[in-house]
Image (cartoon, helix red, strand yellow):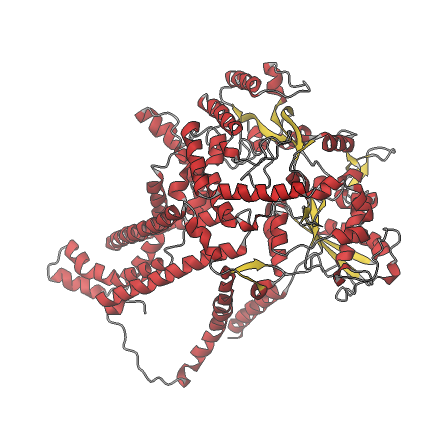
């Protein structure tokens, strides 16, 4: 009899134990009373302050006056629990010294990052600094999830403010307030075609010329590739997109664009009615008819690199940045080369899509800004964030201490390295294999990229949400299929535009143009 | 099969342990299903995370507009309703037929094997199903194109994912293949509950197999069929997202025949992340389902009172 009662009791107890246990990498290291985050005297929360707010340089912060605090940071990334905790501990040593706070960086892999971020933001859990990823800053602002940081920058982020150009700050501004600190990364894109080097050499195609290649030249290349390798398709797609970006300024949603970002025209047009779009679609249709594009391109969920790896495609149209071929070559399994079709241009989205924002639920935004400032300007901070701990995650290749590689005994997955996800990769060590002047290349790339006439302008879409929702559905119906050449262009583009008009694209464009003209006039 | 007459006055005390056992479940239902209903108000608000649910600005019915104003409004409503009607009716017919056939089988071994096999598709994730379908319908390497259309009919590279015509039939077929197994098992278990004495008496009276089915088996299933169908009506405005988004591989040209209310809302709001508008869609779906269930129940009550749900 006793045995019979024991088992259910044990089961019930184990269920309770499982339910109560909370395994979070976060709770462990930190031993401060974070609940009292008393603000210093100079805090921006007081609204209209009669006291002069003097900008405080990073060195001047009087650490002894600050209450202990835990800075919670959330960003995409992967790593083992031990390694993340180790990096947090190492960073905390620095932050305790500089701002009497410890850091708690949590990370989640990119695949589920946005969902987790949404959960984190809606649950109201402690969060100070985070990387918005693909969530549009507009959405975060209108939902009240992030706070303006203009004053915080002036007070605690002086160095960061000075290090970033006014034009770039403009792209993170809405209604006169700055909301994001843009990451120091590629802030422009150039459009081109990436392809397998071995097959290109085999055909004898010269991809080394430093100029813009024409689509007709590429057509000849595709025909040659198809002849030499009939089982392979010259042009592939990346998760359904043959052209994930076109050389236009999308003005955040592709509904009403500036068709020529290299020019000076400030007229916003419907991309899908322009000759540019019609010609591009006609070109893709021709390619598809001749069997040069992979079938079912628009429904294929594979990435371009994995299709290259499996030998199904020769290459694909892509939007690029410095070091693109080397980076993609690593995941494609073959050496890749690229040719340019359209030169580098920069729009608001290119700058603001990589940045960090301060959450509205932060209890000490000043502290978060202090940390961001340090992360942007201090190589000690930046290297810890990007590369991990010296000796454990990385080591120098030689005594000159300029280039680093994976540390002996470490695994690349212990603390994953994605430099572009951080505030300032430009002050970190160069990874073995990348060009030694990679950061200079980035600088040059960013500064020589043509700025679109609308760079700095952010569209506030709250007045046309219904139209955008409806038009998004219409775009989903036609765009990918048209650009993959799987639909007959003439009649389908006409139908496409008819449906867009029926769903209010003209109101969207009118509203955008109105806001844009106001923004231009105010400059 | 008459329902048991319930006694109006019941003594609570002997049943107290049973009531107590109900309490955790009821508590869970209260907290998980009833309390959150207060959140329905989100559909009428312009939700702002800083102001919270009750502090956010009131938006009236503006969150619902996008569902009706667009040129696709009619299409998504038509697709959702017609597909679901087809699913409910055909599923019922198919499942009843198969369950009767199963019931008539003599071999116990055969019954068990068929039961398992019929139920397996229900267990397969719809994502896997979408890739199975892709294996059949891919333009260049799909089974149908390479082994049926080309050798037999001489049709080359028929692009299944770009042509609308076949998809309504395909989707109904896939739905039935996946879900009829579950209904079959439910009906079959009802059949098991019919007193075999009826069948024996019928055989003695000289009834043919078809007569037995018509006068004993089918009436025995009536209540279960009505219950399942009524419950399905409540979900008539919902759709299996996997079936309508994943299986057609989110292919644009197919939108006219595969876009339902759920996929439309997803596609439209993916970038906008607007909580108010997506809540409005859910609210609309539940309301329609609620009205339909009540109406259908009323109709059933008129026809055959004891079979109505409530």
- Is B197 positioned to the left or the right of A162 in the image? left
Q: Position of residue B125 (x, y in %)?
A: 45, 48
Q: Residue furthest left?
A: B206
Please give the name of the residue rendered at 76% of the width and 54% of the height, measured from the top-left corner. A368
**Residue B253 showing in the rendered view:** yes
| Residue at 63% in and 44% down | A518
Where is residue B80 drawn, in percent x and y? Answer: 37, 50
Q: How many marks?
A: 0
- A156 relative to A452, above or below: below
Name the side, left or right, on which A307 lies relative to A378: left
Residue located 73% across and 50% down the image: A84
Q: Is residue A504 above or below residue A246?
A: below
Quadrant occupied by the C terminus of chain A:
top right
Q: Nearer the viewer, residue B94 or A514?
A: A514
- What x and y, as percent, mark residue B25? 47, 71
Residue B124 visible in this rendered orientation of the protein: no
Q: Position of residue A49 (x, y in %)?
A: 79, 62
Residue A98, by quadrant, is bottom right
Residue under the point 36% across and 54% down: B182
In the displayed image of the protein, which residue is found farthest to the top? A204
A37 above or below A2?
above
- Is B50 left or right of A102, judged from the image as shown? left
Residue toward you, A88 or A379: A379
């Amino acid at each position: 009899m006793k045995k019979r009662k024991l088992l259910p009791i044990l089961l019930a107890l184990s269920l309770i134990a499982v339910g109560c246990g909370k395994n979070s990498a976060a709770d462990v290291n930190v031993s401060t009373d974070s609940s009292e985050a008393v603000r210093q005297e100079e805090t921006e929360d007081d609204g209209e302050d009669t006291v002069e707010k003097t900008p405080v340089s990073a060195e001047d912060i009087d650490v002894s006056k600050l209450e202990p605090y835990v800075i919670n940071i959330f960003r995409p990334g992967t790593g083992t629990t031990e390694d993340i905790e180790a990096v947090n501990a190492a960073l905390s040593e620095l932050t305790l010294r500089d701002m009497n706070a410890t850091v708690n960086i949590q990370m989640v892999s990119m695949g589920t990052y946005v969902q987790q971020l949404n959960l984190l933001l809606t649950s109201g859990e402690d969060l100070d600094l985070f990387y918005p990823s693909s969530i549009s800053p507009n959405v975060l602002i209108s939902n009240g999830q992030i706070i303006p940081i203009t004053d915080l920058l002036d007070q605690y982020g002086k160095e960061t403010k000075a290090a970033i150009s006014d034009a770039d700050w403009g792209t993170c501004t809405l209604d006169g307030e700055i909301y994001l600190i843009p990451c120091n990364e590629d802030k422009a894109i150039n459009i081109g075609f990436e392809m397998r080097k071995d097959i290109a050499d085999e055909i004898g195609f010269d991809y080394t010329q430093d100029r813009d290649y024409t689509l007709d030249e590429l057509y000849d290349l595709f025909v040659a590739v198809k002849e030499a390798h009939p089982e392979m398709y010259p042009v592939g797609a990346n998760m359904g997109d043959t052209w994930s970006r076109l050389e236009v300024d999308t003005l955040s949603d592709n509904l009403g664009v500036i068709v020529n970002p290299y020019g000076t025209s400030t007229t916003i047009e419907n991309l899908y009615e322009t000759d540019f779009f019609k010609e591009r679609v006609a070109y893709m249709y021709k390619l598809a008819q001749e069997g040069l594009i992979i079938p079912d391109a628009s429904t294929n969920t594979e990435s371009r690199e994995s299709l290259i790896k499996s030998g199904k495609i020769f290459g694909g149209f892509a939007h690029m940045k410095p070091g693109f071929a080397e980076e993609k070559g690593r995941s494609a399994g073959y050496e890749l080369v690229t040719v340019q079709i359209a030169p580098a241009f920069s729009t608001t989205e290119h700058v603001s899509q990589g940045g960090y924002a301060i959450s509205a639920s932060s209890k000490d935004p000043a502290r978060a800004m202090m940390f961001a400032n340090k992360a942007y300007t201090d190589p000690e901070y930046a290297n810890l964030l990007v590369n991990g701990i010296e000796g454990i995650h990385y080591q120098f290749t030689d005594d000159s201490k300029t280039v680093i590689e994976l540390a002996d005994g470490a695994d690349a997955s212990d603390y994953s390295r994605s430099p572009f996800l951080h505030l300032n990769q430009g002050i970190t060590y160069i990874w073995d294999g990348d060009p030694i002047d990679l950061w200079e290349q980035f600088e040059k790339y960013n500064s020589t990229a043509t700025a679109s006439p609308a760079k700095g302008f952010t569209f506030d879409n709250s007045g046309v949400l219904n139209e955008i929702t409806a038009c998004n559905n219409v775009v989903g119906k036609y765009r990918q299929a048209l650009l993959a050449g799987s639909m007959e262009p003439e009649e389908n583009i006409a139908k496409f535009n008819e449906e867009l008009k029926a769903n209010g694209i003209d109101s969207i464009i009118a509203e955008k143009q109105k806001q844009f003209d106001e923004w231009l006039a105010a400059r | 099969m008459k329902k048991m007459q319930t006694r109006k006055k019941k003594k609570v005390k002997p049943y107290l342990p049973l009531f107590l056992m109900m309490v955790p479940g009821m508590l869970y239902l209260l907290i998980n299903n009833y309390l959150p209903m207060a959140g329905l108000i989100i559909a009428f608000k312009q939700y702002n995370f800083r102001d919270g649910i009750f502090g956010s600005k009131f938006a009236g019915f503006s969150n619902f507009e996008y569902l009706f104003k667009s040129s696709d409004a009619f299409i998504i409503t038509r697709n959702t309703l017609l597909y679901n009607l087809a699913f409910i009716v055909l599923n019922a017919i198919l499942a009843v037929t198969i369950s009767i056939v199963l019931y008539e089988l003599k071999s116990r071994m055969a019954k068990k094997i068929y039961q398992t096999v019929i139920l397996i598709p229900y267990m397969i994730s719809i994502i896997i199903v979408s890739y199975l379908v892709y294996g059949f319908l891919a333009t260049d390497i799909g089974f149908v194109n390479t082994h049926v259309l080309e050798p037999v009919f001489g049709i080359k590279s028929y692009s299944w994912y770009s042509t609308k015509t076949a998809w309504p039939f395909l989707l109904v077929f896939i739905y039935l293949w996946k879900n009829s197994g579950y209904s079959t098992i439910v009906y079959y278990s009802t059949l098991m509950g019919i007193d075999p004495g009826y069948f024996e008496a019928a055989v003695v009276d000289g009834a043919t197999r078809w007569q037995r089915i018509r006068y004993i088996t089918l009436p025995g299933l009536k209540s279960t069929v009505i219950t399942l169908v009524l419950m399905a009506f409540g979900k008539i405005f919902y759709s299996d997202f996997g079936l309508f988004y994943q299986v057609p591989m989110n292919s644009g040209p197919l939108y006219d025949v595969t876009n339902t209310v759920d996929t439309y809302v997803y596609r439209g709001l993916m970038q906008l992340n607007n909580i108010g508008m997506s809540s409005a869609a859910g609210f609309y779906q539940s309301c329609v389902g609620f009205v339909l269930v009540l109406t259908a129940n009323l109709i059933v009550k008129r026809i055959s009172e004891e079979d109505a749900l409530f």
